[in-house]
């Protein structure tokens, strides 16, 4: 049933006057689906409530952080307790070591870790450290992988950049990207060729070990294995960007799931428990290059912020103690099967990959293994589906090229309601 969005419309008009596009991050702007972004008022568990009082089952979870749903009581309590002692000191606190120790215990590749304030800062810093460590400049990234809005990585990036049709951005000087080599994901031949030509000049390879930012794309195991071998052979730093997948696919991230250990790892989203946190970590000999221990400069006035650290500690402790990963994967698998069954019954070409609590329904007949295949999806059909689901009270990621996220707060009733909504929404797609 169509919902009223009057207050969202008023607020969007207001926001557009003072904020570029009315949003502080383009992925929120409904650019890929049209219409007015819904302004939110409150989150609770698996639900979001907009300004007009509509309730939605939320499959975005703030684009990743809310694996335990909105406002888990333990995390809110930890934030309030930290606030009671102050918001920021610009001096070290015990909380920073506590979160660092949790990350080191969880993520196989991480022996030391530095906290920053966003995923973008994490990848930007990791690339700098890899270059400083190796004394080399060139890096490899993959088409469709998004690593934040870092100059040198904003080439054929996925996510918002892809949705808005500018995967590479004006304002990035050619000099910033001249050392960035872009290859196709899941293509071992291109990888071998690139290492043959540039091997001994390559500082780093950075990738999403499981991609969320062109929609969910799962790596071929041989691709990851070959990457590890080539980086070892050429002294190149292998960086897994686990800003999305860290603590999401398993407590140790994609690297634990696939049993491949990178040299460096970037984290964000879940690690902040809903507060702005990023982190980069890895082998101790590499991290020892970072200032003030080593010569590679990287700093942050609010880095390791005590309120954010407290939220992150509460989040990681809950995930470690509860091990919610099997139940999350079970819900997600049944959601994927349900959506596929409806699409199949209605004769809608689709593929619905899922892994752990990540899922994308592609309106694409082929298995999506790379950006080239993802780009053949029917985005007009996705836009219709998105709005029809919104009308039925299901808040999906507002682009075909995004992963959706399940939280531990999603219930059997939410699953049934989501599939009932999908039945109606897909029905609209095949009407005359
Ligand atoms: C979200 C994301 C980033 C950027 O993180 P921000 O906190 O938005 O700067 C980087 N890499 C990946 C894989 C992401 O999903």
Image (cartoon, rainbow, N blue to C red):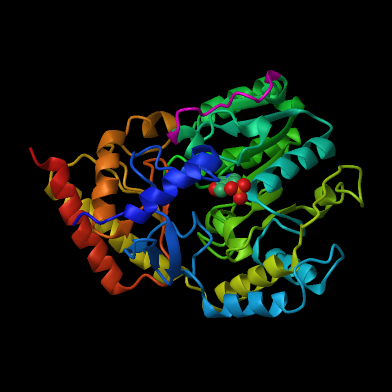
Q: Main secondary structure of the magenta part?
A: loop
Position of residue 85 measured from the top left corner of the image (x, y, whole percent): 77, 78
* Quadrant of the image occupied by residue 237: top right
**In front: 191, or 350?**
350
Residue 375, compared with residue 217, is above or below; it is: above
Residue 334, compared with residue 398, is above or below; it is: below
Residue 242, compared with residue 233, is above or below; it is: below
Please report the residue visible at 64 percent of the width from the left and 70 percent of the height from the top: 311
Position of residue 414 measured from the top left corner of the image (x, y, whole percent): 29, 69
Q: Classify the position of the N terminus by image quarter.
A: bottom left
- Is 409 on the left or on the right of 319, as rendered? left
Position of residue 72 measured from the top left corner of the image (x, y, whole percent): 51, 75
**In front: 101, or 175?**
175
Q: Is residue 217 visible?
A: no
Please report the residue visible at 13 percent of the width from the left and 48 percent of the height from the top: 427
Residue 195, compared with residue 7, is above or below; it is: above
Q: Is residue 98 visible?
A: yes
Please report the residue visible at 70 percent of the width from the left and 75 percent of the height from the top: 83
Task: Reply yes or no: does residue 167 show up in magenta.
Answer: yes
- Is 343 on the left or on the right of 375, as rendered? left
Position of residue 319 measured from the top left corner of the image (x, y, whole percent): 56, 72
Q: Which residues are magenta?
A: 163-174
- Is 53 on the left or on the right of 307, as rendered? left
Task: Reply yes or no: does residue 361 show up in magenta.
Answer: no
- Is 147 on the left or on the right of 294, as rendered? left
**In front: 346, or 333?**
346
Q: Residue furthest left?
A: 432
Q: Classify the position of the C terminus by image quarter.
A: top left
């Amino acid at each position: 049933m169509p919902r009223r969005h009057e207050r969202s419309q008023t607020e969007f008009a207001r926001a557009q006057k003072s904020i570029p596009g009315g949003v502080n991050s383009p992925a929120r702007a409904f650019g890929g689906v049209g219409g007015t972004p819904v302004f939110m008022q409150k989150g609770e568990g698996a639900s979001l409530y907009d300004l007009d009082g509509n309730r939605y089952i939320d499959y975005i979870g703030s684009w990743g952080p809310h694996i335990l749903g909105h406002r888990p009581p333990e995390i809110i309590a930890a934030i309030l307790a930290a606030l009671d002692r102050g918001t920021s000191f610009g001096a070290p606190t015990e909380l920073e070591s506590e979160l660092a120790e949790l990350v080191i215990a969880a993520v196989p590749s991480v022996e030391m870790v530095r906290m920053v304030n966003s995923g973008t800062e994490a990848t930007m810093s990791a690339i700098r450290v890899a270059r400083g460590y190796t004394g080399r400049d060139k890096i490899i990234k993959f088409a469709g992988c998004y690593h934040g809005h870092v100059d040198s990585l904003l080439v054929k990036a996925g996510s918002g950049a892809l949705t808005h049709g500018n995967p590479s951005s004006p304002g990035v000087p050619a000099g910033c990207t001249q050392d960035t080599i872009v290859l196709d994901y899941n293509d071992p031949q291109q990888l071998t060729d690139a290492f043959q030509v540039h091997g001994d000049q390559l500082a780093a390879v950075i990738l999403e070990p499981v991609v969320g930012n062109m929609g969910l794309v799962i790596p071929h195991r041989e691709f990851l294995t070959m990457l590890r071998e080539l980086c070892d052979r050429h002294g190149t730093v292998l960086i897994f960007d686990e800003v999305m997948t860290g603590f999401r696919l398993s407590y140790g991230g994609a690297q634990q799931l696939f049993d491949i250990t990178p040299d460096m790892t970037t984290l964000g989203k879940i690690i902040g428990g809903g507060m702005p946190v990023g982190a980069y970590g890895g082998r101790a000999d590499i991290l020892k290059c970072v200032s003030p221990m080593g010569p590679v400069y990287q700093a942050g006035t609010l880095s390791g912020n005590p309120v954010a650290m407290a939220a992150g500690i509460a989040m990681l402790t809950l995930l470690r103690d509860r091990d919610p990963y099997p139940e999350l994967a079970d819900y997600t698998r049944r959601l994927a099967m349900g959506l596929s069954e409806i699409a199949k019954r209605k004769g809608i070409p689709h593929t619905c990959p899922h892994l752990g609590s990540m899922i994308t329904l592609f309106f694409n007949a082929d298995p999506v293994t790379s950006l080239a295949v993802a780009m053949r999806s029917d985005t007009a059909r996705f836009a219709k589906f998105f709005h029809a689901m919104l009308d039925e009270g299901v808040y999906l990621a507002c682009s075909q090229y995004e992963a959706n996220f399940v939280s531990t707060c999603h219930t059997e009733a939410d699953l049934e309601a989501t599939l009932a909504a999908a039945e109606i929404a897909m029905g609209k797609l095949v009407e005359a």
